[in-house]
Amino acid sequence: MTTSKLKDPALDRLFEAILLLGDVDECYRFFEDICTVAELKALAQRLDVAKMLEQDATYTHIAEKTGASPATISRVKRCLIYGADGYRLILQRLREKKSVDTPQTP
């Protein structure tokens, strides 16, 4: 288990609540209530930026495709290099899920 600098009981409750969501529809329902549209779009944008950085896309290409600012791209890159490996963890799991969900052609 990783010890986070952010750890506190309120965040524990939030993360436990998120882990109880059963599917994408439930995620939409919960996050629509708890976040603003701008907050959700910013989170989704950061995940897209992380994916593109892992694929060695240039800042210019990432900015064009996602609308992210250079500051956002730089922040995500710092997290990929020096962070808690959360982006890498979830991007790997998304790739694994995609490979399981995608039928292999003979």
Image (cartoon, rainbow, N blue to C red):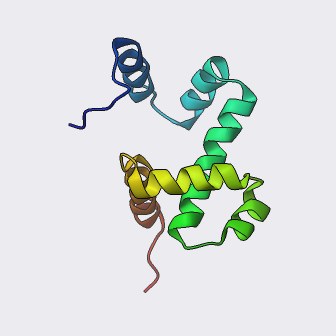
Q: Which residue is depicted at the point 66% across and 48% down? A: 45
Relative vertical location of residue 7 with respect to residue 83 in this rendering, above or below: above
Q: Please state the horizontal and vertical placement of residue 59, each as a whole percent of the image.
A: 68, 66
Q: Please state the horizontal and vertical placement of residue 99, each as a whole percent of the image.
A: 43, 66
Q: Which residue is depicted at the point 66% across and 34% down? A: 40
Return the residue found at the far top.
10
Q: Which quadrant does the C terminus fall into?
A: bottom left
Q: Foreground residue, 54 or 15?
A: 54
Q: Please state the horizontal and vertical placement of residue 93, each as a whole percent of the image.
A: 39, 55
Return the residue found at the far left.
1
Return the residue found at the far bottom.
106
Q: Foreground residue, 69 or 22?
A: 69
Relative vertical location of residue 87 with respect to residue 58 in this rendering, above or below: above
Q: Which residue is depicted at the point 69% across and 64% down? A: 62
Q: Which residue is depicted at the point 45% across and 56% down? A: 80
Q: Dividing the picture into quarters, in which one does residue 18 lie? A: top left
